[in-house]
Amino acid sequence: MLADIHCHLDFPDFEKDLDSVIERAEKAGVVSIVTAGLNNVTNAKALEISKKYPAVKAALGIYPEFAAQMGEEAVKQEIEFIRKQKPFAVSEVGLDATYPDMEKQKEVFKQMVSLAKDLKIPLIVHSRGAEKEVFDVLKEMNARKVVVHCFSGKLSLAKQMEKEGYFFSIPAIVSYSSQFRELVKTISSSHLLTETDAPFLSAVKGERNEPASVKQTAAVIASIKGVSAEEMENMLFSNFQKLFMQ
């Protein structure tokens, strides 16, 4: 069994053939697909999709770009909406240096961390160009059930995060990305998960990504770690259960 712990099934890329996308994922052995919201509109869409497909779970959050734009009252209302929905995880949240107003981002991110702790559910974190800042917030707030999504920071920082018990979700581009291959080598198998970030980060450049690709990702991770694909799939799914089901 396999899990895609981070994707965006609400994106227009999937409007015409989402039934087929889910069917292909299930045929590949993917039993859990976590689709992440970014704001009030996409959070609602993630919930709608999760109600239609049993394999799909909704993760709700406020993405850094929108965190920097939203007013205080709008943030408060969305947090209360998320709280009432009791989502599978809080996502997609975090910090991103490519967007303005890092202090506003950080303010909203801290509220997201608190929400995940209150709800006792995992926090799936975006940290582009702000990995150290994200780590500082997580440590300050004693966040525990953490997945670091698409980590691209220093490997020394990744090891510090692993020591705190955080998990790292590996995308399909591990098949050709030296950055993610080194991350897989660095992090213990017991702290790895699979994601797609679909429709992005396909193993084939220029093609749409979809949840079924975690099958290939698990095989690549297995090859890097020097174990069988079956053994790695079992480990990855055990990690998923440990974090999301306990």
Image (tube, rainbow, N blue to C red):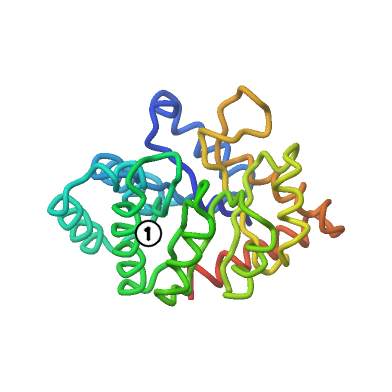
Q: As displayed, is residue 219 above or below residue 110?
A: above
Residue 77 in the figure: left or right of residue 34: left
Please identify the quarter of the rendering in which residue 141 is found.
Answer: bottom left
Placement of 17 over or under 10, stated as above or below = above
Q: Residue furthest right?
A: 226
In the rendering, at what x and y percent does residue 2 appear? 61, 54
Q: Nearer the viewer, residue 77 or 161?
A: 161
Q: Residue at the spot x=69%, y=63% of the render?
A: 156
Give 152 or 19, whichever is nearer the viewer: 152
| Residue shown at 52% from the left, 42% from the top | 197
The residue lying toward the viewer, choosing from 102 and 47, is: 102
**Horizontal and vertical percent for residue 31?**
54, 53
Q: Which residue is mark 1?
A: 90
User: In the rendered view, would you say 167 is above or below 127?
Assistant: below
- Say which quadrant the N terminus sits in: bottom right
Q: What amino acid is at disc 1? A: Val
Secondary element under disc 1, as helix, strand or loop, is strand
